Image (tube, rainbow, N blue to C red):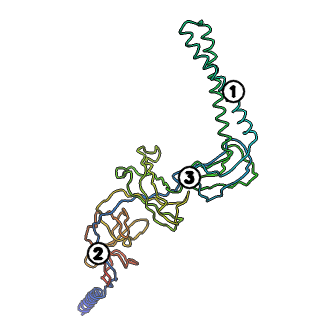
Amino acid sequence: MKKKILCMVMAAIIFTGCGKEKNEEVNVQKKPIVSTAATMRVITDKYEADSNAIPKNKIDHSLDSAGTVVKIYKKNGDKVKKGELVIKLKDSKAEGEYYSARASFESAKSTFQTTKNNYNKYIILYNKKLVSETEFLDYKNKFTDAEGNYLSKKAIYLDNKEKNRKLSRTAEIDGVVGNLFLKEGAEVKQGDILFTIIDESEMEVSVDFPGKWFSKLEVGGPAEVIVGDLGNKTVKAYIKEINPVADIETKKYRVKLGIDNNINNKDIIKDGMYVKAVVPAGKREVLTIPQESIVIRNLLSYIFLIKDGVVKRIEVTQGAVQAPYIEILSDVVKSGDKIVVEGLFGLADGDHVEEVEGTKK
């Protein structure tokens, strides 16, 4: 009798367990998701680097001697032409040295011309054997000494002339005045920067380019810069210069970009503005998915692959980005495979899923 009861209890337990398993299968929770297919696309590799924009031409104007500011004709931001007067200074010492050097030069020039004429006459006389060799050599030595003195005085005169000229400091290029902070009557030391002239018509940006894409570069090729100070505005650029010699430490190649600053209307790129340079580096056909399909966990990248209504979490390596798509590298994911693009929050490996309206194709 006891044996019979024990068999009945065991049968009841087995029956209850089977019923529970069947019930769980019926009540499996399916999470709503939107899927898309991994697709082969042609993308453009792009190299990005932070840099600063500088004018094509920029000249700091200094003084070769000390001086006092007499008159200021321009202010910061003014446009000037080459040769246009910006500041007038006075330096009594420089002016005195200039006039003294000019007088010495004129005297040496006169003596040189006289001795030169005499020397030329004695060449003729000596060739006709009308004067002795001693007399001829005496005039030749006088001419040589006079020539040396003349050239020496000329160099000193020209140096002082340039110093005196710079007391009336003019712009050396067309451009815009900057760094002009002097006041009339201010004392200026030798070598001090008086003002700067920048030519903003073209700006330049330099970046260090990796060797793996060096063969993709060519002078005149397209590029662009994103200017943070102009609200992240994207501005067209071009490859202006390529240094074929790698930096000893970084092993990268300096590439200079040119930007036509006249086409940006009011959004003129200014000297020193921060930019992000973007240089195209060739095209490739690669496996891509939407960027929002990527899940980052513990610094690793994952996607959820869908098969038979169940998701499997797959680790992938991110590649080039061409918004809204991103290249992925994986030995598991193939073109055409369905992956989850929406509904990723709370999704776990092995979850059952079902498509909802809005599924991406």
Q: Amino acid at mark 3?
A: Asp
Residue 95, image quadrant: top right
Crowd tier of the residue under label 3, counting other residues whose Cα lies within 10 Å: few below 14, some 14–19, many 20 or above:
some
Q: Amino acid at mark 1?
A: Ser
Residue at 66% from the left image edge and 33% from the top image edge: 157
Residue at 65% from the left image edge and 39% from the top image edge: 162
Alpha-carbon span between mark 1 and mark 3: 39 Å
Q: Earlier in the sequence, mark 2 or mark 3?
A: 3
Give the foreground label among 1 and 2: 1
Q: Secondary structure at mark 2?
A: strand
Q: Which residue is mark 3?
A: 174
- State which quarter of the image contains the N terminus: bottom left
Q: Say left or right for 311 vs 94.
A: left
* 332, above or below 256, in the image: below
Give the foreground label among 2 and 3: 3
Nearer to the camera, 293 or 144: 144
Q: Residue 286 at what x, y percent from top left? A: 29, 63
Crowd tier of the residue under label 1, counting other residues whose Cα lies within 10 Å: few below 14, some 14–19, many 20 or above:
some
Q: Amino acid at mark 2?
A: Ile
Q: Which mark is residue 306?
A: 2
* 216, above or below 229, in the image: above
Residue at 37% from the left image edge and 70% from the top image edge: 324
Q: Secondary structure at mark 1?
A: helix
- State which quarter of the image contains the C terminus: bottom left
Q: Earlier in the sequence, mark 1 or mark 3?
A: 1
Q: Secondary structure at mark 3?
A: loop
Q: Residue 115 at what x, y percent from top left? A: 63, 19
Q: Which mark is residue 107?
A: 1
Alpha-carbon span between mark 2 and mark 3: 65 Å
Nearer to the camera, 268 or 359: 268
Residue at 25% from the left image edge and 92% from the top image edge: 8
Residue 66, image quadrant: top right
